[in-house]
Image (cartoon, helix red, strand yellow):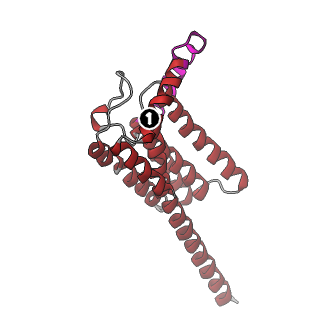
Amino acid sequence: MLLGGFFVLLWQVLSHGFVTRVDVHVRNGIQSAAHSSGFSWLFKIGRGCADLGDRELSLLCIVCVTAYAAWHCRSWRPALPAAAALVVLATVIPLKLWIARPGPGEVVLGDADLGFFPSGHTADALCCYGMSAFLLYLFVWQGRTARRALGGAATLLVAATMFGLLWSNFHWLSDVIGSLCWCAAWLLVIARWSTGSTASVARSRDDASADHETARL
């Protein structure tokens, strides 16, 4: 379903369809509010939120979390889903280059020459912060409370990044939603595979322990 949503957005962007008209309408509404005197205080906050998707910051996060998870469980298994998430992130650049969509404003981010659809900053935030939360849950801090806390933190960081990109006029709405659909679809696949793989390892260890105890008896 997420991939289906991405390809619908891709088709609309390439064909300059209805979604692109919605993009303009949403951009105009947001920028009208952003430049009003009542919301001038949000300018720096919005720019700071957009910076959450900077590649240096997001990559530092996932590298540190992966290293900590590997140290905590005394295994390199956390590196596998982390590497897979980075592969998903790497697919965004060829998409941006192929589509070569222009941005909504004159002030742009550092990688503007690559194109704007899908949003690279949204992909950075989702792949790095989302996978970091998943690794902490899978290998470090488990349970319902952990799932809610880590999931909420990752959601907040990604949502703040998306808000900052739209408020600062760095991206169209379909750019950030398209990136969300594309990356989330593949991250869900990685998460399911990782969860199944970890469960299999745990069962194997339990079976080995049980066999050992039986042999002692």
Magenta region, residue range: 33-54
Q: Nearest the camera: 136 or 151?
A: 151
In this picture, residue 120 sits left or right of residue 157: left
Q: Residue at x 51, y 47 (%)?
A: 65
Q: Residue at x 41, y 57 (%)?
A: 84
Q: Quadrant of residue 12?
A: top left
Q: Position of residue 76 (x, y in %)?
A: 46, 61
Q: Residue at x 62, y 48 (%)?
A: 151
**Is residue 41 found inside the magenta-colored segment of the image?**
yes
In this picture, residue 193 sits left or right of residue 145: left
Residue 189 visible in rendering: yes
Picture layout, residue 96 above or below residue 213: above
Q: Secondary structure at mark 1?
A: helix
Q: Quadrant of residue 116?
A: top left
Q: Position of residue 213 (x, y in %)?
A: 67, 84
For disc 1, the marked residue is: 21
Q: Position of residue 69 (x, y in %)?
A: 53, 53
Q: Residue at x 38, y 48 (%)?
A: 10
Within 10 Å of the Cα at label 1, are there few (<14), some (14-19), or many (20+) other Cα atoms? few
Q: Please state, as top left, top right, bottom left or bottom right, where the C terminus lies in the image.
A: bottom right
Please identify the residue farthest to the front as the structure is shown.
18
Main structural element of the magenta stretch: helix, strand or loop? helix
Picture layout, residue 8 above or below residue 217: above
Residue 62 visible in rendering: no
